[in-house]
Image: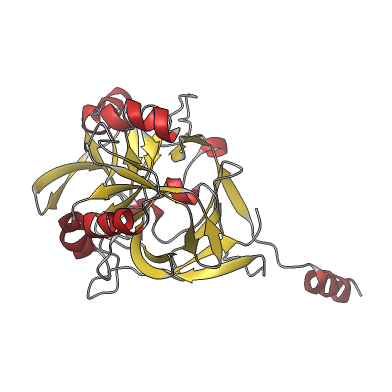
Amino acid sequence: MKKHLVSFLILSIPFICFSKELSSEFKNNLIYLKPKLADGTTLTFFTDTGGGWNAISRELSEKYGWEISQKESENGVIEVTDMPPFDPEASIPLAGLNNWWAGKLQVVPSEEFSSTTKSDGTLGGRWHAEKVISFNYPEKKVEVLDETPTSTEFSTVPLGFQKGMDGSYTMAFPSIDISVNDTRIPMLLDSGASAWPSTEAMEKGGLESGQVATSFIVASIFDEWVKSNPEWLVIEDACNFSHQPMIRVPHVRIGNKTVGPVWFTRRADSSFHQFMSSMMDRRIDGALGGSALLYLRLIVDYPNEQALIANEI
């Protein structure tokens, strides 16, 4: 009798997708994870689905005496270490293992990344790889899920990844299609895409100071948008870092959802058509960053190569 009752209870429980919420901070629609070490020290990792670096500061590694080993790379020998031992109640998962880094973090002087991100480390595409991660921008929450949600509350958008002959990720950079004015545009899904607004961009565009989320688009499309849509706001020399203009696009279609306005920063065609596309599954025209993602609860399902977008949020 008890056995039948247990079986009935198991069958009657609805599907539940278990998750672990990660301690995080959303700053200007860029995402920083905030795990704690065993001694209570909080670390800050800049997260970047479109970045190639998984790294941690040399200063921290030396302070705590973490074991450092050497690894041969295309650019010579580099130093790497394992993910630090975190407080189990405030930890973050290991990086994806199915790639060249195999879960390791490169050990580098903090000045090499903290001058812009103000962080103790960075987590790029290959940290996110092999996970199902929920980026809930409106509620400012990051969760790692143990299953892919099957709810009808989400629409699905295919993602593409460049892989090696053995099927492993190269960079684990996701490609995703968007639509502007009914024109399909292939993009890099890039949570770390950043700009540093000029005074004019802050005053005319209402952008925040310091490092802010943006999206990127190649110059040829940017210039066509300017020509075809004179009513769209354009700010010249909008980024203090790149000195490129920015344009405010009223509506962008991502899957079944239309969002906007979305800021795009101009980049040379070669930056994406040659450089970034060489690390992608296809040629892309830009990067979809936090200036668009800020409207979404987005689940990036790496194992099934898809993004799930909440229909309502």
- Indicate the position of residue 240 as horizontal and vertical percent values: 26, 31
Residue 294 image position (x, y, % from top left): 51, 46
Name the residue furthest left: 76
Q: Is residue 69 visible?
A: yes
Toward which corner of the image does residue 114 lie, by quadrant? Answer: top left
Q: Residue at x 45, y 40 (%)?
A: 31
Residue found at x 34% / y 62%: 187
Relative to 162, residue 18 above or below: above
Indicate the position of residue 275 as horizontal and vertical percent values.
17, 58
Q: Find residue 217 and report its horizontal and vertical position in percent.
A: 30, 54
Q: Quadrant of residue 68?
A: top left
In the image, 159 versus 133, the foreground residue is 159
Count the numbered circles shown.
0
The residue drawn where x is 33% and y is 48% is 124
Q: Residue at x 38, y 44 (%)?
A: 214
Horizontal side, residue 242 vs residue 20: left or right: left
